[in-house]
Amino acid sequence: MSTQSLFSVNLVRRKLASVEADMVTGYVYVLCDPNGTYRYIGKCESTLDNRMDLNKWKLRTDYTCSPLYRYVHDEWGGTFEGWSIHEIASVTFDRRLLPTALVDCEDMFMQAMRHAGHPLLNKNRARCESVDRREYMRQWRLRNPGYMARKGREHRARRERARVAALAAKAEELAREVDSEQTM
């Protein structure tokens, strides 16, 4: 895995009232497949190596949770071997006064890469453009606390039951094969 920078922009987002203690740095990155094709734009506030390790862990634990992981599972044998992660922007911003600065930069680069014709696997915008929709969803989350966590647990439980059932079926099939070989 490579983590060199193709090109990188250093951005600072602050207001007059910003103080140094509230400033944090995050990164916008692009994931490239082994052929060098730009496949995914993301953001992180940790190192790119840590972010790539998190991608690998998510791919191992639940590859169905995103289009990126499904693509890597189906098209690249379930491994990020040969993939590279590249910083395309370093964003220093005031988390207190400009909490969406990193997401806004991620969205800007996502749009620019799509406009340039890159086949990104990102399916959604980094942030919904509609203020009304964002407020509606915020209110919905307040009215339905724990909904997403509960649905996530239910989904993982269904997947685990399906995995166990598939293993049981495979074990039963192997047991039948062993029985038929012993009776010959």
Image: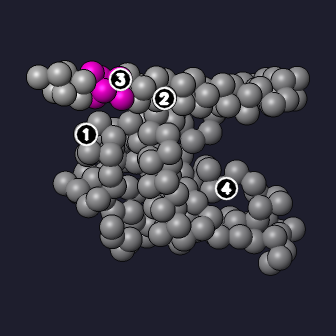
| Residue 75, label in figure | 1
Q: Distance between the residues labelled 2 and 4?
A: 43 Å
Side of 112 relative to 118 (left or right): right
Of marks 2 and 4, which one's residue comes earlier in the chain? 4
**Tag 3 residue:** 172
The residue positioned 70% from the left and 51% from the top of the image is 100
Q: How far apart are marks 3 and 2 (CA)?
A: 12 Å
Amino acid identity at mark 3: Glu
The residue positioned 59% from the left and 31% from the top of the image is 156
Q: Is residue 178 above or below residue 78?
A: above
The residue positioned 65% from the left and 70% from the top of the image is 25
Badge 1 marks a residue whose secondary structure is: helix
State the image coordinates of residue 76 (x, y, percent, origin top left). 25, 45
| Residue 101, label in figure | 4
State the image coordinates of residue 153 (x, y, percent, origin top left). 67, 31
Badge 4 marks a residue whose secondary structure is: helix
Quadrant where the N terminus sits is: bottom left
| Residue 164, label in figure | 2
Q: In this view, does 55 lie above or below 181?
A: below
Q: Is residue 7 visible?
A: no
Q: Distance between the residues labelled 2 and 1?
A: 24 Å
The residue positioned 66% from the left and 25% from the top of the image is 154
Amino acid identity at mark 2: Val
State the image coordinates of residue 140 (x, y, percent, origin top left). 81, 23
Badge 2 marks a residue whose secondary structure is: helix
Of marks 3 and 4, which one's residue comes earlier in the chain? 4
